[in-house]
Amino acid sequence: MATTLSEAQKRDFFHDGFIVVRDAVPAPIHRRARATIAASLPADERRLLVPPRLAGHPDVLALFNESGLKELMENTMGPFPDVISSQVAVTPPHDEMGGGPGPHVDGSWGGVIPTAPEEIDIEHGRPRDAEQYFGPDDTRRGTNDGQLWQDPQRRISLGSYTALVGVAVNDQLVPGRGQFAVVRGAHEAVEAVFRAQRDSGSVIGPEGADWPRIKISSAGRPYLNGLPDSIRARANAAAARAEPIEGWPWPMLTPVCLSAGDAVIALHSCPHTPTPNFGLAPRMNIYFRLRRLRPESPHEGTRRVGHGVSDHPDRGYFGQFLDYPDDYDAFQTSIDKLCDHWCEWDGMQEIVEAQRGAA
Ligand SMILES: [Fe+2]
């Protein structure tokens, strides 16, 4: 495979917020990973709980570290700490995912919230009895290992990174097979929300301007709100204009149709979601979360950050606060990058400048 994106790919990446790289992983590597994952799954395929040890298994990490993807990302993004873990994401066959897809920007807290709408303080988007659900001082770790707040000062409620790299190890070319899906082209508007939050002195992320953490659905059920209100409105408007796709009942979303060995690269700010799998085979994707190296941080590459899997690398993976030198504000640095996401992409600078100039 090529280890640089072509000019056309870079332009698509700039406009769409994601790009598909075909045949990114050689067959022996993705077949081995698939066999290792398949051998670890329980026999009852309706309950596919992936064993945690797979996340750092050499056969799984080889999808990134021993394919051309590592060099492609070095060339497109820049240097980054070693990838030591991953998210092995298997969607069982015949899986309708309960409430359906939930597009989101990565890095929010995911956990149990009240089921009754009267238990929600709508104005603040929080449970009325917050301690019961969020723990004392909002310290309860989410079921997704996320935190309610990144920093002790509660300036930022969203973990972040630079790039999500997903590798398919089974074919998923027909829409409705559990595809990774994106809100195509919404990344710049998401960046604009972060800027507006920063410029208005708001919290950055959920509970900040334009982004209630908990909302009530039209069916009267509280849900964790993965997208700022303006982004959801924008996506709904785009959905009304979208060409229908057969077998794909979610016009807000673009299915990322992959063959085994293909990869998708998405900006952190590109809203995404897994989708129901109506097919007969498990959908198997492996995700690597990369953050461009921040040389000022003394914790780059330490195991407890969990580079490759973590969506909140300013904290330890399990939510530990890390000690930072007085002259390095890890959280403000993340705010700055969220408000200027292309600044972390060395290989995209010329195209970003040219496309912005052409706009
Ligand atoms: Fe996600």
Image (spheres, rainbow, N blue to C red):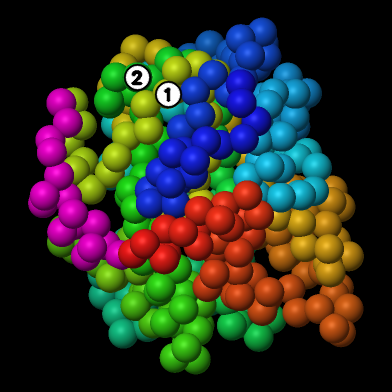
At x 31%, y 85%, the residue is 123
At x 44%, y 91%, the residue is 200
Image height check: is 35 above or below 13? above
Residue range in magenta is 231-246
| 157 or 345, nearer to the observer | 345
Q: Is residue 243 magenta?
A: yes
Q: Quadrant of the N terminus?
A: top right
Image height check: is 185 above or below 283? below
Is the residue under label 1 in contact with that under label 2 (CB below 8 Å)?
yes
Q: Is residue 205 magenta?
A: no
Regarding residue 348, the answer to whether it shows in the image is yes
Q: Whole-percent x and y of residue 221?
A: 24, 61
At x 56%, y 36%, the residue is 5
Q: Which residue is mark 2?
A: 173
Could you tell whether 212 is left or right of 79 in the image?
A: left
Q: Whole-percent x and y of residue 119?
A: 32, 74
Type of secondary structure dominating the magenta stretch: helix
| 296 or 286, nearer to the observer | 296
Q: Which residue is mark 1?
A: 258
Q: Amino acid at mark 2?
A: Leu
Label 2: how many residues lie within 10 Å, few (<14), some (14-19) or many (20+)? some
At x 76%, y 49%, the residue is 80
Q: Amino acid at mark 1?
A: Leu
Q: How far apart are the alpha carbons under marks 2 and 1?
A: 5 Å
